[in-house]
Image (spheres, rainbow, N blue to C red):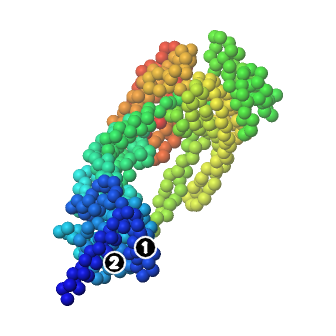
Amino acid sequence: MNTKISVITVLLSLILAFGICAQEEGLVTDLSGNDGNSSIRDEQGSDYSEFESFPVINPALRKSISLSFKNMDVVEALKILATRGNINLVIGSNVSGKVTLILKEVSIRDAFEIIISSCDLAFEYENQIVKVMTQKEYEASHGRRFKDTKRMRIFQLKHANVSGLLDALNQMKSNFGKVITDSGSNTVIVEDTPEKIKDFETFIQNTDLPIQTKVFNLNYAKADKIQEKIQEVITKNIGAVRIDERTNKIVVSDFPEKLNLIEKIIAAFDEKSPQVLIDAQILAIIPYPEFKNGVDWNNWLKNNFSLSTVGGNNLSVGIANDNKLADNDSVNSRIVGLLHKFGSVEVISSPYIAAINNQETKILMGTKEVYVSQVATESEFGSKSTTDQVNFVDVGVKLCITPVINRDGFISMKVRPEVSSVKDYYKYGKPAKSIPIVETSETETNFIVRDGATVIIAGLKKDVHDQFIANKELVVILTARTFSGDSFIPEANSSKLKEVSREIGLEYYKLVTDKINFLALAKQPEGLKGQVQLSFTIAQNGKLISNPVIVDANNPELISYAKKAVMDASPFPNLPKNFKKDKVTFGITLNYE
């Protein structure tokens, strides 16, 4: 019996030795599964770094191996690799499946990993023993899938609001990543690949920065207008903009770099708006009999001035050329002299008015017709009552001018003249009340002139029965000059400045308007906002000739305050000695913010 056992042992040893030798010589040994089509070829491979799943260095795992498995049972395939790599292997009872692969010259370690991955299996290394199991068993034991590359990182934000970053973080994560936020602790929990974790870390470092707050005092721009522009550039979900309309201040909170940008934006828009000083003359011509049917203004302007006539709207617009005027006469005086050809000329008004760039200003010469209307009201208790309401309607000549200053020394002007008169009165009720029936004629024209040029607008005519403009031809002479602060902008040369000085003088104009603005600001009513435009006439001695006339007001409650500011500012200094007229009409716009 013992002899038989010894013989069998010797035979097995020879077979095993022969098989190993044959394999080392490159011979093929049949280690197939059921179909007998698999083959293995081992050779000494190059030095591979130790795979992290096998912390104990095993030189056998570094060998290169070539495999060809077709539909081989995965358990048998793992056994082959365990034998070749000297791996202590334990395979769970639930491990099953087939594997088909062709590998050439890969390490035993890599081949083992490939088979595990292709069959959706898992393994763990403990005490130099590799335990192979299913993914489900691995998840139950470790709480995650095998070879799950996701990592978890907790970020405690110090400055930024976690809710504000949530949208950006969700866009950054991978398809299987997770982002969890806790607003109470201002914490972000991120679970993703190591590469994505680094991206999250960089993003949070660049956004979780100290937020600074800065208050900007606006001098000219309106806070609500600037707020709209800043909202476009502040950091989304982090920056904030608040305004205080009463003090015209704007408060911005954002990163320091953004605050620097916002400061530049505010400085660019908070500029003192350039203004246009308009010297206007409104002339009424009572025509001679030969011109009772009208005057050919286009022909007259063409013969006497270098002009650009503008057709349409029954208006003729000409631009005066100083070269065609007498050297010793002012432009306006020369034009008035030429108009005497058509009839007697009456100066209805000669106002000076400052218009803000791209804002409409109005010149009204006439009256405000007053009429009373009744308004029915009902209280919350159901009782009805009727009250009288005082209404005003402008009658006369109104000139609406909107200048737009261009950078190349030109001014674009939109001029809308309006002539109105009371045609009749509508009477009703007992005692009888009357409402004026106003007949109005208005037109509009647009033109571009060089800064300081004089424009003649003719063709305004209306046959009305009114002592102010009855059966008269109306001609408007406008000279617009740009200025900003205390002086003209560069386009206004010294000759234009001398011409202004010869008339009223910019210094006198500024002295008058600054005094009124100061008193208006000092006595500004609390809680009332709006704009009031008025005109007033100053005599040679600096006193007001009459009460200020309201040209326009978007808040009627401010009218009394505006009038009082003008009246309190009077008397003004005497008119300049070189001013040839005994009175001058000013226009001013008071802004209550």
Q: Answer with mark 2 or mark 1, whichever residue precedes in sequence.
A: 1
Give the spatial CA distance, label 2 vs label 1.
Answer: 14 Å
Residue 409 at x, y = what percent?
A: 58, 25
Left-right relation of 481 to 329: left
* Farthest-out residue, bottom: 1
Give the residue type that dot 1 points to: Ser
The percent coordinates of residue 438 (x first, y second) are 64, 48
Residue nearest the viewer, comparing 584 with 140: 140
- Front-most of 519 and 567? 519
Which disc number belongs to residue 75? Answer: 2
Foreground mark, 2 or 1, reads 1
Query: Which residue is nearer to you in this view: 375 or 441?
Result: 441
Q: Nearer the viewer, residue 532 or 575?
A: 532
Quarter of the image for residue 50 reads: bottom left
Q: Residues within 10 Å of mark 2 (few under 14, many from 20)?
A: some
Mark 1 sits on what residue? Answer: 38
| Quadrant including the C terminus | top left
Please give the label number shown on residue 405.
none
Name which residue lies at 47% across and 40% down.
Answer: 532
Q: Is residue 295 visible?
A: yes
- Name the kind of residue labelled 2 in the image: Val
Quarter of the picture holding the N terminus: bottom left
Label 1 secondary element: loop
Q: Quadrant of residue 121?
A: bottom left
**How far across and down, in percent of the image, does residue 337 sit?**
69, 19
**What secondary structure is found at the residue carrying circle 2?**
helix
